Amino acid sequence: MKATIHVTLKRGVLDPQGKAILASLSHLEIDGITDVRVGKFLEITLKDMAEEEARRRLDEACRRLLANTVIEEYRIRIEGGGGAR
Amino acid sequence: MRAAVLVFPGSNCDHDALDAAYRLTGTPPREIWHRWSDLGGVAVVILPGGFSYGDYLRSGAIARFSPVMDAVALHANSGGFVLGICNGFQVLTEAALLPGVLIRNANLRFVCREVCLRVERNDTAFTHRYRRGQVIRLPIAHNEGNFYLPEPELDELEARGQVVFRYCDEHGNVTRAANPNGSARNIAGIISRDGNVLGMMPHPERRTEALLGGEDGTGIFLSLDDHTRGR
C-alpha cells in the first residue's frame, strides 16, 4: 500500500527559502503570488495492513525521524488501506 | 583527559578534534566509529563537524540513530561530558540531548569565516579557562547554523543560563550585524541544564595553534582537561 506524507514548517518559523523563491517568482513577473513556504513530500510504500495500523506506524516514523517537531508538522495520507489488494 | 571522538559517515572534522585533544591534553583520544556501542569508559565524548549522512533529511537527523548514540545518551545521563561541534551540535539537538534546532542560515548562504563570540559563562566545565564577557575568535563553516526555539522556550533557556556563547562584534557587542546566520538572540553555543553537554556551531578545534590562525579554541579543551583530571 502507498502513503504520502507532507512535512511542512510550522507557522511562525522563518522560511528564507520560501522568501527567496517568492522573490524569484516576482522577478519572473508572475503576479498574484503572495507567499511561498517550502516543505518536503515523501512517498512511502508499506506492506498491506489495516489503515489504522499503517497510520500508527507512519505517525511514529514522522515523530521520530521524518519531521523535527520543534519546527515541522506533518500530514499523512494513506492511499488504499485495508486488506490485500 | 580520556576522550573519544565519534566518526559518522560524512564527519570531516574528526581529525582536527583528535589532534587538538591530543596536543592539548597529552592523552591520545579514541576514535569511535558510529556503529560501535562501547565508548571505552572515557570522560569526554566529542561529536565533530562534517556532513554526517550527507545532511540527508535534516542535518544530524540520521546520525542521531547511529548505534553509538545510545552509549552517548547513557554517558550524558550519567553526567559524562559531551561536546558537540557544528554537525555534532546538530546531532545533539536531533537526539534531544540539547534543546532547540539548527535550521537553514537566514541569508541562505553557506557561511565560512571567522566570527567573534562572547563567552557568556565561565562557570562551566567547558569554559572556566575563559573570562566572563571575553571575546574570542573562532571560525564557522555551515549552512544550517541558525539556532531556533519558540520564544517562550528561549526565555526559559536564557533564564536558566544555558546560553554559553553569543555572536558579537570585536568589542563584545551582541548586534544583528555580528550575527552570521540569523540565530535567535545571536546564540552560538548552549549547555544542557545539568551542565555536562555543550553544543556550539563554531569550531574550537580549528583554533588551537597560532600558526593556523589563533589559539582561542584551546580554552575549551583545557577546561575539560582540568575538570576530568585523572578520569
Image (cartoon, helix red, strand yellow):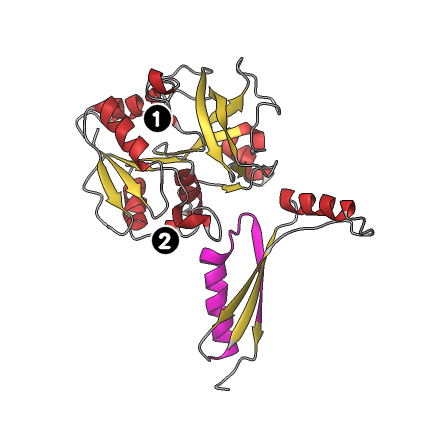
Q: Which of pointers 1 and 2 lies earlier in the amino acid sequence?
A: 2
Q: Which residue is mark 1?
A: B126
Q: Which mark is residue B65?
A: 2
Q: Amino acid at mark 2?
A: Phe
Tell me: A31 left or right of A59.
Answer: right
Residue B98, located in which quarter of the rendered image? top left
Vertical position of residue A77 compared to residue A48: above or below: above
Q: Is residue A75 magenta?
A: yes
**Toward the viewer: A75 or B113?**
B113
Q: Position of residue B60 (x, y in %)?
A: 43, 47
Name the front one of labels 1 and 2: 2
Depth check: give the residue in front, B25 or B56. B56
Crowding at dot 2, Cα within 10 Å, few <14 / some 14-19 / many 20+, comes out as some
Q: Position of residue B24 (x, y in %)?
A: 25, 22
Task: Evaluate if marks 1 and 2 touch, with contact meaning CB atoms under 8 Å apart.
Answer: no
Q: What's the residue type where badge 1 is placed?
A: Phe
- Looking at the rendering, the stretch of residues picked out in magenta corresponds to A49-77
Mark 1 secondary-structure assignment: loop
* Side of B100 where B211 appears, left or right: left
